[in-house]
Amino acid sequence: MKASTQPVLYGVGIGPGDPELMTLKAVRVLKGVDVIAVPKSKEEATSLALDIIRGVIDLKDKEVVELIFPMKRNQKELVEAWEESRRQVIERLEGSRDVAFITIGDPLFHSTFIYLLEALCRESPEDRFYNIEVIPGVSSINAASALSCTPLAKSGERMAIIPATYGYEKLKETIEEFDTVVLLKANKAIDGIITVLEESGLKENAVFVSRAGLAGERVTRDLDSLKGKELDYFSIIIIKKGR
């Protein structure tokens, strides 16, 4: 039971894709709420997050609200989309209904929930008639590490997590400075990444993981086999100096 009578907005991490990697708390919260908010990149798209929870949560008596978070660079359009999502969530909370915003991975790591949270936090906490609670989830990095059996960091080691499109010169500097480097969304930058790793003498210390926790999981240390290939959006490279 809730400790407060105020409605609650839950940011629920549902893990990397395998429903069995959802936490017990995530499942309990999703079963108990009235409304499930689902982030989507565009109206006609299907929601991977919703597909993941279908096998665990009975959606029959729940309202599913689709929130559009467009993949655009136009800041004005993005702000308008975030504000519309905020409006829809507030509307349900004003009806004293708990809302769970589901997100793949963890809600506070490279998640669309962050944008909603920022929009909501523009108002003073004293003026808020609802509570916000975040349910952490297994991230894609943890899933990729487990799938490839690659330790992320031992005691005293330092780790950096950066987008693969960070810039190759900066990537070189990061590799030199940290013991472990995790590259997110490595699909479109793979050829340049391989070149940097070759120049750094670390190509044999890297592992490529795609779709960890989803159908079609792939793990390979043969990075040359990836050159010039069209790779999945959910792709990660872990570079481990001490391997």
Image (cartoon, grey):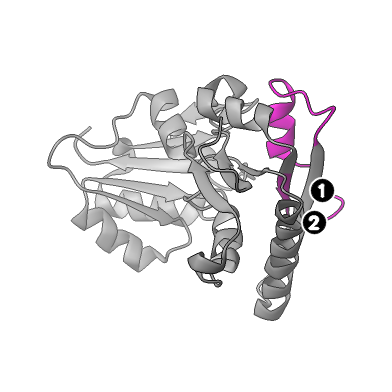
Front residue (pair 14, 134)? 134
Q: Which secondary structure, mark 2?
A: loop
Q: Quadrant of residue 74?
A: bottom right
- Judged from this view, the residue extending furthest toward the front is 5
What residue is pinned by disc 1?
45
Question: Can you see residue 239?
Answer: yes
- Judged from this view, the residue extending furthest toward the bottom is 76
**Span colored in magenta:** 37-62
Q: Which secondary structure, mark 1?
A: loop
Residue 140, above or below 192: above
- The answer to whether residue 102 is magenta is no
In percent of width and height, residue 174 lies at: 27, 59
Front residue (pair 156, 19)? 19
In percent of width and height, residue 71 lies at: 69, 62
Residue 4, above or below 172: above
Front residue (pair 4, 32)? 4
Q: Please give the name of the residue rendered at 79% of the width and 29% of the height, measured from the top-left corner.
A: 59
What residue is pinned by disc 2?
42
Question: Would residue 191 appear left or right of 203 to someone viewing this image?
Answer: right
Q: Please give the name of the residue rendered at 72% of the width and 61% of the height, measured from the top-left corner.
A: 85
Given the image, on which type of amino acid does mark 2 rest?
A: Lys
Question: Can you see residue 23?
Answer: no
In percent of width and height, residue 188 lies at: 57, 54
Given the image, on which type of amino acid does mark 1 rest?
A: Ala
- The answer to whether residue 59 is magenta is yes
Q: Residues within 10 Å of mark 1 (few under 14, many from 20)?
A: few
Tell me whether circle 1 and circle 2 mark residues in contact (CB < 8 Å): yes
Image quarter hosting the C terminus: top left
- The tag on residue 125 is none
Question: Would residue 210 appear left or right of 67 to someone viewing this image?
Answer: left
